[in-house]
């Protein structure tokens, strides 16, 4: 019997896109597509186990070896900073991680002029923000938010935001614009370091299969 492979997937669009690729490889994703209240789902014939978790938890499960592999956005992976092997760019879930704020000269016209002693960055990615500005030698104050980050500059809580940007429509609707691009973001396949050694054949089979699907 082959080794059990456990995949940790972020609930939502990333999981659905991943299921499409896996099904094209002959893996049965019926259970994970329709989990109900179940927390652990299977393709028992292929000995593949699925766990559906919050995006921010995927790196944790893979790092601790509870999952052999995981699919997670590059932004979440960077923020977690876990020692994982990033083995494949899956190419979907594309967006950009950006610094955004008011265009030069427009801040005062917003009615919420910001005058802080320290440059303030509102973000749900405090570790990325600290690293990004730290590499530039800039001192910042991080305002950690987890919803409607764009509100930070609008109401004067922060000078800028660091967040993912897809279409940019929310920024434009609030008079904000992208000032700097930190990095491109897409879904990545990550692997536990021990699993890559102890289950090398099975892990490589999955990596090669997904890679072949992406090339079609």
Image (cartoon, grey):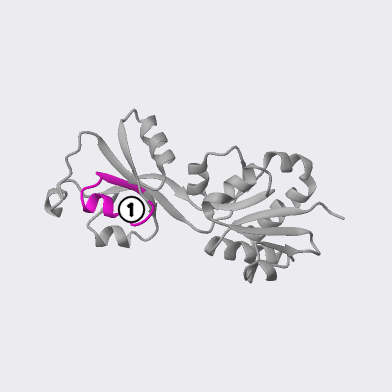
**Residue at the farthest right position:** 1
Q: Nearer the viewer, residue 44 or 167?
A: 44
Q: Quadrant for residue 31, please give it.
A: bottom right
Q: Quadrant for residue 18, please give it.
A: bottom right
Residue that mark 1 sits on = 149
Residue 60 visible in image? yes
Residue 179 visible in image? no
Q: Residues within 10 Å of mark 1 (few under 14, many from 20)?
A: many
Quadrant of the snapshot with the N terminus: bottom right
Query: Where is 168 relative to 97, above or below?
Result: below
Q: At numbered mark 1, what does the secondary structure look like: helix, strand or loop?
A: loop
**Residue at the farthest front position:** 37
Quadrant of the snapshot with the C terminus: bottom right
Asked if residue 112 is among those painted magenta in the image, a careful observer would answer no
Residue 79 at x, y percent in the picture:
48, 43
Q: Nearer the viewer, residue 29 or 22?
A: 29
Q: Nearer the viewer, residue 154 or 92?
A: 154
Q: Nearer the viewer, residue 119 or 208?
A: 119
Identified at 22% across, 57% down, the residue is 175
Q: Would you say 143 lies left or right of 61 here?
A: left
Query: Where is 215 relative to 139, above or below?
Result: below
Q: Would you say 103 lies left or right of 111 here?
A: right
Identified at 25% across, 54% down, the residue is 176
Residue 13 at x, y percent in the picture:
53, 64
Magenta region, residue range: 146-162
């Amino acid at each position: 019997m082959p080794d059990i492979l456990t995949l940790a997937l972020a609930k939502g669009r990333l999981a659905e896109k991943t299921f499409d690729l896996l099904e094209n490889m002959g893996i049965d994703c019926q259970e994970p597509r329709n989990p109900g209240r179940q927390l652990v789902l299977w393709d028992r014939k292929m000995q593949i186990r699925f766990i559906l978790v919050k995006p921010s938890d995927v790196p944790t499960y893979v790092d601790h070896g509870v999952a052999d592999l995981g699919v997670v956005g590059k932004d979440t992976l960077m923020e977690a900073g876990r020692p994982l092997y990033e083995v494949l760019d899956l190419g979907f879930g594309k967006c950009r991680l950006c610094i955004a704020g008011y265009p030069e000269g427009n801040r005062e016209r917003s009615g919420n002029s910001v005058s802080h002693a320290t440059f303030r960055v509102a973000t749900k990615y405090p570790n990325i923000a600290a690293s990004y500005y730290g590499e530039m030698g800039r001192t910042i104050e991080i305002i950690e938010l987890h919803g409607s980050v764009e509100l930070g500059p609008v109401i004067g809580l922060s000078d800028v935001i660091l967040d993912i940007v897809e279409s940019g429509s929310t920024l434009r609707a609030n008079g904000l614009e992208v000032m700097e691009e930190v990095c491109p973001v897409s879904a990545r396949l990550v692997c536990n370091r021990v699993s890559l050694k102890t289950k090398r054949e099975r892990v490589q089979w999955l990596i090669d299969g997904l890679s072949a699907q992406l090339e079609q």
